[in-house]
Structures are given as C-alpha cells and as structure tokens.
Amino acid sequence: LGRKIGLGVAVGLALAIFVFWLGWVRAPSPQEICAHKIELVLETTGPEQREGAEALISRLELNCVQAAQNKIKLRGKLVYARYAKCVIAAQTLMDAERC
C-alpha cells in the first residue's frame, strides 16, 4: 500500500511539472516572435510607407532573433515565455514593443 501511494505521488508530481511546463514555460520560438513582428509591420503600413517598412523589416530580420535569444540567456525561460506570449498576442507593433 505504501508503494502505491508513493508511486501515485510521484506520478502526480510528474504530471504537475508537465502541466506547469506546458502552461508557463513553453513559449513561441524567437523565429516565431520575429515573424509575427514582421507581419505586424506589413499589416500596419500603407503603400506610401513601404520604403520605411522595408528598412524596419530588414533591421528586424538582422537583430530580432538574436535579441530574443539573449533575453532567454539573460532573464531566463519564465521571463522569456511571458514576453513571447505577449508579443504573439499583440495586435500592433507598438503593443509588441511594449512587451
């Protein structure tokens, strides 16, 4: 009986850790974040702003992934997960930059 209880507790703990990881730690990749930011730029610019938008997109493509990877290294996965989820939920580039 003691073994069954111990096994049940271990399985419950493993399940709790897995759910925690899925809900809080698992986050979109840096590439997904950057792709979303580029989509936001394209959605919010008109034809007269294309030149500026292309410059912004070029800058995002160069720096965005590395900046997100640095955020993971410097602040940890939990902080990065919160940031990444915020960026993906953003409806405008300004909202994404506030994350």
Image: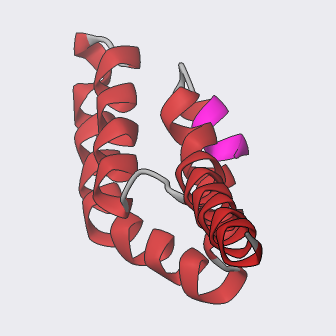
Quarter of the image for residue 87 reads top right
How far from the left and from the top, in percent, is residue 53?
Answer: 31, 35
Give residue 47's quadrant in the image: top left
The image shows residue 59 at horizontal and vertical percentages of 33, 60
Whether residue 97 is situated above or below residue 60 in the rendered picture? above
Is 79 on the left or on the right of 39, as rendered?
Answer: right
Instruction: Tell me if residue 19 is in the magenta stretch.
Output: no
Q: Nearer the viewer, residue 6 or 90?
A: 6
Helix, strand or loop for the magenta stretch, by majority: helix
Left or right of residue 32: residue 7 = right
The structure residue drawn at horizontal position 49% and vertical position 35%, both measured from the top left corner, is: 88
- Seen at 35% across and 68% down, the residue is 65
Which residue is located at x 35 percent, y 51 percent?
Answer: 34
Residue 60: image x %, image y %? 35, 57
Left or right side of 72 for 36 = left
Residue that extends furthest to the front in the rendered view of this protein: 1
